[in-house]
Image (tube, rainbow, N blue to C red):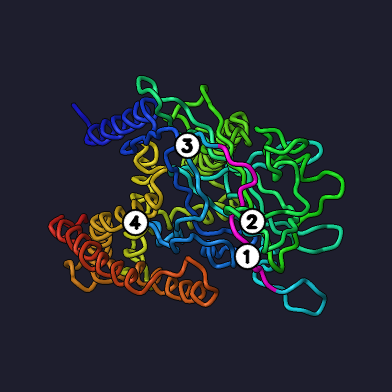
Amino acid sequence: MISRGAPLLALVGLLLAFASTTTQAFYFPGVNPRSFREGEVVNLRFNSMTSIKTQLPLDAYHLPFCQPIQGITIMNQNFGEFLQGDRIHNSPYKLEMKVDKYCEPLCVANLGTMQRRGVQPNKVVRAIRNKYHHNWIVDNLNSASKHEDDNSVTTRYWGGFPIGFRSHEDGKSYINNHVNIIIDYHPVEGQESRYRIVKFVVEPFSIKHEWDDDTFEDGRFNISNPIKSCQPSNVVGNRQPDQHTSYELVTASGRLPQPASGRVLFTYDVIWKENLDTYWAKRWDIYLSMDSAVPPKVHWMSIFNSMMLLCFLSMLVVAIFVKTLKAITDNYDRVPTDAEKEQEMTFKKWTLVHADVFRPPAFSPLALSVACGTGMQLFMTSLMVILGSATGHINPSKRGSRIMAMLVWFMLMGVVNGYITTKLHRQLTKQAASRKVTWIAATAFPGLVFAGFLVYNMAAWINGSTLAVPFTTILVLLVIWAVVGIPTTFLGAHFAGKRPIVD
């Protein structure tokens, strides 16, 4: 005879098998590669600036940095990106496939007042002190950050790169006004002169450029104290034709960093590298593994420790339970003494409460039912999001997909909430299903979350953060909840109302 749970187990096994085969077969479902020709324009975009000190992302143009000549344009984004605070804009940087650039001037920006004691620091200085980072995007690939010092070179594949740093010597803040944009490309097999971007790294530097505005010619400034990479290559004794900005040049004797105040000249290098080892389908692997910053052995050891702790606690509970039951059953096999009679009364008190789990709570059966229904709704939502991530349909290349999946599945799993809440409430109260119970199940938890969301959104709006959701987006969220979330809850309650009450 086939058990009732066999179809469910078969379905779970099929989903897990599909997840494992999908993640090994191809990059990410629904993601198509883009190929570039040599000299073709490659767009660099700005995402919101994030901080490792605060939880409030800021718009990329919140600070007085260089802006595109054609004006600031926000890219088309989905609902999930707006909710998680992403605001993607165009940038003033000009990139062309396989075209290197050397100390290219971007613009001169006024960052604000000078840093003095007793003077309110400007916005850029405050952002540096709060450890804000740029988050740039090229071909839908997030920028990694390369940091170099006298002893080592470190590349981080999460969190973007810092807009500046604060000196431990004088306590002043300095702006990273030069960046090396390093992009790896892979030739497309079977397509001549076609290339795909497989890696994107930004190495920031702080260089104190000195220039004269009157010497601006052909889009370049005549820098009076140029480093080698900022010198014209057609003059004898200047930089080599392929010499890019490097740590050695920036930290050479006599070089100073650029303070985060006053008028600042921004420059950049573009470095293209051929990468035959990394294919386009594997370019996100180094981001997902964080370049092995945490070795796989650590994850396996963590899993092993958790399993051992779970087994130990389970064995402890079982041992206590068996010992207690054995003491109870032994009392029925012989005539107890007076001392054992007193001990037996203790055991009888324990056995008297074994059926309390089936008794309705004296305070509020409705609150218990709603809590159980909402808990199952959240559990099923989490399960479906995990399965979506395992199959690759929820992935970092689809920005906002995780939040979108959470919202959609939470609305759909209102069926589970309505069914569990109604069935449990009927079981506890021995009453017929009512619309009041269903309305409370559909509105209690979402209402509390939405109230907290409004308070959080107001705080984000006051601080000028991109986490502040526009009013129209909030209305759309309410409409989705009213059209999908509430009806699915009533649908689950309808099915539960047809089920008999168990005596």
According to the picture, the residue beneath numbered tag 1 turns out to be 109
Q: Are marks 2 and 3 in contact (CB under 8 Å)?
A: no
Image location of residue 476, percent across then percent down: 28, 68
* Callout 4: SS: loop
According to the picture, the residue beneath numbered tag 4 turns out to be 78
Q: Residue at x 25, y 64 (%)?
A: 480
The amino acid at mark 1 is Ala
Q: Residue at x 48, y 66 (%)?
A: 466
Q: Residue at x 38, y 33 (%)?
A: 35
The amino acid at mark 3 is Met
According to the picture, the residue beneath numbered tag 2 turns out to be 266
Residue 243 numbered tag: none
Residue 97 numbered tag: 3
* Callout 2: SS: strand
The amino acid at mark 4 is Asn
* Callout 3: SS: loop
Label 1 and label 3: CA atoms lie apart by 27 Å
The amino acid at mark 2 is Phe
